[in-house]
């Protein structure tokens, strides 16, 4: 079940993010951006949704509605639940949320060292728009037009 995160989810969300992104620290040479976010604040702002199964948070989405599209700011799946298609379900949920909001594009970014993510996003129909250094991270920006 995908649902809005609540204050009770702060610790499980933070633990999931730490576990999901830890493997990238050696590649990047620092903690990835998602590990530096204030999830209590993001949850309080209504920007976080979680995939919950049998009382456990197995996936996290951070969605930010913008005037011209939906920013999928973060998508993460617990390492223990990876390989079950939860990432694809979360991505589809983000696209459905964009449609509900009347938005025609979903944008995201990832660190260029996260090559697995780049391949997944391309397979799901996202296209690279540009690359840039942002907040000290080398990021690849992508988008998917929902009418495509």
Image (tube, grey):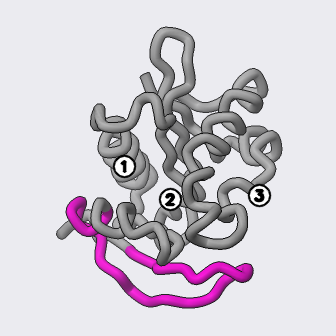
Residue at which label 3 appears: 36
The magenta stretch spans residue 137: yes
Q: Is residue 115 above or below residue 79?
A: below
Q: How many neighbours does mark 3 have within 10 angstroms: few (below 14), some (14-19), or many (20 or more)?
A: few
Residues 25 and 138: in front is 25
Look at the numbered discs 2 and 1 and tell me whether their residues touch, using CB distance below 8 Å: yes
Percent coordinates x, y for residue 131 in the rendering: 48, 89
The range drawn in magenta is 121-142
Residue at 64% in and 31% down: 5
| Earlier sequence position, callout 3 versus callout 1 | 3
CA distance for labels 2 and 1: 9 Å
Q: Is residue 139 above or below residue 39?
A: below
Percent coordinates x, y for residue 10 in the rendering: 75, 32
CA distance for labels 3 and 2: 16 Å
Residue at which label 1 appears: 91
Q: Say which element carries label 1.
A: helix
Residue at which label 2 appears: 72
Left or right, residue 128 beside residue 22: left
């Amino acid at each position: 079940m995908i649902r809005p995160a609540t204050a009770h989810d702060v610790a499980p969300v933070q633990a999931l993010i730490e576990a999901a992104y830890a493997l990238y620290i050696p590649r990047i040479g620092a903690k990835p951006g998602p590990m530096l976010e204030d999830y209590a604040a993001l949850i309080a702002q209504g920007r976080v949704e979680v995939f919950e199964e049998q009382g456990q948070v197995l996936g996290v989405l951070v969605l930010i509605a913008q005037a011209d599209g939906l920013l999928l700011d973060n998508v993460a799946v617990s390492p223990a639940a990876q390989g079950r298609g939860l990432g694809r379900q979360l991505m589809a949920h983000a696209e459905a949320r964009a449609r509900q909001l009347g938005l025609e594009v979903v944008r995201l970014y990832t660190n260029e060292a996260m090559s697995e993510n780049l391949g997944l996003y391309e397979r799901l129909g996202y296209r690279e728009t540009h690359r840039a250094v942002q907040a000290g991270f080398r990021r690849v920006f992508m988008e998917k037009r929902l009418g495509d």
